[in-house]
Image (cartoon, rainbow, N blue to C red):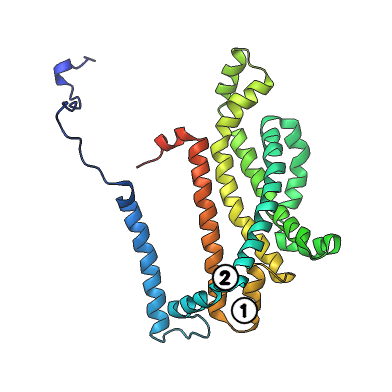
C-alpha cells in the first residue's frame, strides 16, 4: 500500500498573526443551555396552563401563582429557613460520616480481594433494606433526636457510596498498576499514585448520586418523627391541607440539592482538571 504524498494531505491552515480567530458560542449561550431553559419553561407553561385553566383542581395541585404567594409569605418567617438548615445539617453530617467510612472501605475491597470476600455477604444482606426500615430500630436505640435522623442518613447512603467506590477501584487499568510495580513502586505508592487517581472520577460520581439518596433518607426520617426540617414542614402542611406549602417544601429540597450538586461539580473540576478535556463542548 502506497503512502500518500505530502501534497495530497489536507492540513488545517494555521491562523496568520493578523487574522482574527473564529467566533465561538460564549459559554452561557451554548445550545445545551438554551435547550435546558426550553425544557424548564415548557414544564412551567404546562403546569400553569393545567392549573390556571381549571383543568386540574388547586385542591390537588396548586397553581404556580399560589405556590409563589405561599413562598413569599413563609420566606419572611424563620420557619422555612430553620427547616432548610435543620435538614441540611442532618444530611451533610450523616453523608459525611458515610463517606468517611465507605470510601476507604470501598478502595480496600476493590484493591484487595480477601477484604471483598469477607465483606460482600454483609453487603448483600444490607443492600436490599431501604432506609425507612431502620427507623423503628434507630428510634429504639437513639430516641427521636438528631442522632436518629443522622443515623438514618448514614444507613441509607453508605452502601451506595461503598458500591460505587468498589466498582470504580476495580475498573482501574491493571496495566497501569503493573507498570508502576515494575518501576519499583510499593503498595502504598501504587494506591496513592495509580489506584486513587484512576478511581476518583467514579467515586465522585457515586457521591453525587448518593447525596440525593441521603436527602430522601432524611425526609423519610423527618416525616415519621421530627418537629423541624423540610420533611416535617411538608408533612405538617399536608395535615393542614396546605398544598402550596407542600410544593414550596419540595422546591426548597430541589434547590438545595441543586446548589450542592453545583458545588460538587466545582470540586470535581478542581480535583480532576484533566476530565474537562474529555467532555464534549
Label 2 packing within 10 angstroms: few (<14), some (14-19), many (20+): many
The answer to whether residue 159 shows anywhere in this view is no
Q: Is residue 20 left or right of residue 222?
A: left
Inter-mark Cα distance, 1 to 2: 9 Å
Give how far across and how far down residue 42 sits, in percent. Answer: 36, 68
Residue 178 higher or lower than 163, as above or below: above
Q: At x 14% / y 29%, what residue is drawn? A: 18
Name the residue carrying label 2. Answer: 249
Residue 23 higher or lower than 128, as above or below: above
The residue nearer to you, when weighing 108 against 82, is 82
Q: At x 20% / y 38%, what residue is drawn? A: 22
Name the residue carrying label 1. Answer: 237
Q: Are marks 1 and 2 in contact (CB under 8 Å)?
A: yes
The residue nearer to you, when weighing 273 against 116, is 273
Residue 95: which numbered mark, if any? none
Give how far across and how far down residue 73 sits, in percent. Answer: 52, 78
Amino acid at each position: 500500500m502506497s503512502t500518500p504524498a505530502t501534497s495530497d494531505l489536507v492540513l488545517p491552515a494555521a491562523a496568520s498573526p493578523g487574522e482574527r480567530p473564529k467566533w465561538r458560542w460564549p459559554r452561557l449561550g451554548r445550545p445545551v443551555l438554551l435547550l435546558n431553559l426550553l425544557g424548564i419553561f415548557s414544564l412551567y407553561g404546562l403546569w400553569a396552563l393545567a392549573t390556571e385553566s381549571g383543568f386540574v383542581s388547586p385542591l390537588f395541585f396548586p397553581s404556580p401563582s399560589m405556590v409563589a404567594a405561599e413562598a413569599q409569605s413563609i420566606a419572611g418567617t424563620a420557619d422555612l429557613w430553620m427547616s432548610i438548615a435543620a435538614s441540611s445539617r442532618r444530611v451533610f453530617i450523616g453523608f459525611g460520616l458515610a463517606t468517611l467510612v465507605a470510601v476507604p472501605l470501598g478502595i480496600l475491597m476493590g484493591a484487595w480481594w480477601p477484604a471483598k470476600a469477607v465483606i460482600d455477604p454483609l453487603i448483600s444482606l444490607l443492600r436490599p433494606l431501604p432506609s425507612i426500615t431502620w427507623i423503628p430500630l434507630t428510634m429504639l436505640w437513639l430516641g427521636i433526636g438528631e442522632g436518629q435522623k443522622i443515623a438514618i442518613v448514614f444507613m441509607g447512603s453508605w452502601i451506595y457510596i461503598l458500591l460505587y467506590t468498589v466498582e470504580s477501584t476495580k475498573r482501574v487499568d491493571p496495566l497501569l498498576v503493573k507498570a508502576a510495580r515494575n518501576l519499583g513502586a510499593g503498595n502504598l505508592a501504587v494506591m496513592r499514585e495509580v489506584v486513587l487517581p484512576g478511581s476518583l472520577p467514579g467515586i465522585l460520581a457515586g457521591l453525587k448520586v448518593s447525596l440525593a439518596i441521603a436527602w430522601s433518607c432524611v425526609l423519610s426520617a423527618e416525616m415519621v418523627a421530627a418537629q423541624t426540617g423540610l420533611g416535617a414542614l411538608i408533612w405538617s402542611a399536608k395535615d393542614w391541607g396546605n398544598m402550596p406549602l407542600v410544593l414550596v417544601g419540595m422546591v426548597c429540597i430541589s434547590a438545595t440539592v441543586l446548589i450542592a450538586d453545583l458545588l460538587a461539580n466545582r470540586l470535581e473540576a478542581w480535583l480532576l482538571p484533566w476530565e474537562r478535556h474529555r467532555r464534549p463542548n
